[in-house]
Image (cartoon, coloured by chain):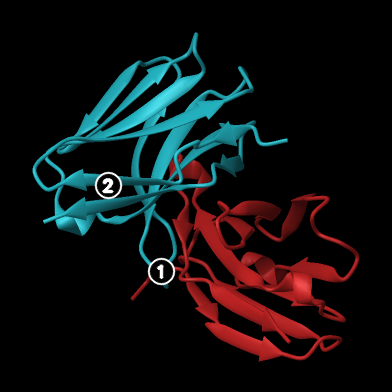
Chain colours: A red, B cyan
Amino acid sequence: DTGVSQNPRHKITKRGQNVTFRCDPISEHNRLYWYRQTLGQGPEFLTYFQNEAQLEKSRLLSDRFSAERPKGSFSTLEIQRTEQGDSAMYLCASSLETRWTGELFFGEGSRLTVL
Amino acid sequence: DQQVKQNSPSLSVQEGRISILNCDYTNSMFDYFLWYKKYPAEGPTFLISISSIKDKNEDGRFTVFLNKSAKHLSLHIVPSQPGDSAVYFCAALSGTYKYIFGTGTRLKVLA
């Protein structure tokens, strides 16, 4: 399967612990996005990478959140000192700028539960 | 401030009938709109899109209508099928890369 892959699919952690999510975009997609979705809400933009450069970071992303995309391939989203309010589905999406159709390809998401 | 709004959290439709899902937006600078479908435990999947230079786009059973003056778009599904039961999100493209999503409408197609 050459779709967007996210790991782990589900993470349960205690408040105060650090967690890291990984996203492997579709091969050759140079655009990568992280979104967060909570119950009853639509996906909320967190951050955007074009190749390895992080071009935008939402104000929703506090200092406890950091995202990286070394070498412009996979990306990681780390949350430090997790809080119960961080419980959500974290969605990764990718697209290819040079053949832009406006379509984002989403992964299946990583669900975080903070106890 | 919610720039993309889906005011109906849920909709039930009989199989074979038309489903109409609505979406409103506030920013007149948005020039590209998309609809996504989401099943439980899966990521959203792209359904159909429309550019602001058009007022209608069709793809099989799915048609999206755009009314720029009213800042309103709608998704029509006809005929509706039980497999269409899912949460539908509309999204608007802000600038060249940022997609802003609505809160979603849960569609249930009754057999």
Residue drawn 43% across and 58% down?
Answer: B44
If you read the primary sequence from the N terminus, does the residue marked by circle 2 or circle 1 appear first? 2
What residue sits right under mark 2 in the picture? Answer: B12
Label 2: how many Cα within 10 Å (few below 14, some 14–19, many 20+): few
Residue drawn 61% across and 40% down?
Answer: B97
Instruction: Say which quarter of the image contains residue B83.
Output: bottom left
Instruction: Inspect this view and state whether residue A101 appears.
Output: no
- The total number of labels drawn is 2
Give the answer, above or below, for where B38 lies relative to B49.
below
Compared across the picture, whether B104 is left or right of A80 comes to: left
Give how far across and how far down residue B72 sits, in percent: 46, 21
Q: Residue furthest top?
A: B69
Chain of the residue on which disc 2 is drawn: B
Give how far across and how far down residue A91 sits, in percent: 57, 65
Give how far across and how far down residue B38 sits, in percent: 39, 58
Instruction: Inspect this view and state whether residue A16 appears.
Output: yes
Instruction: Say which quarter of the image contains residue A112.
Output: bottom right
What residue sits right under mark 1 in the picture? Answer: B42
Chain of the residue on which disc 1 is drawn: B
Instruction: Say which quarter of the image contains residue A99.
Output: top left
Viewer-closest of A46 and B38? B38
Compared across the picture, whether B107 is left or right of A83 comes to: left
User: Judging from the image, what secondary structure is the residue with disc 1 in?
Assistant: loop
Badge 1 amino acid:
Glu
Badge 2 amino acid:
Ser
User: Judging from the image, what secondary structure is the residue with disc 2 in?
Assistant: strand
Q: Nearer the viewer, mark 2 or mark 1?
A: 2
Give how far across and how far down residue B5 sits, in percent: 55, 35
Viewer-closest of A103 and A9? A9
Residue drawn 85% across and 79% down?
Answer: A80
Give the answer, above or below, for where A115 lies relative to A96.
below
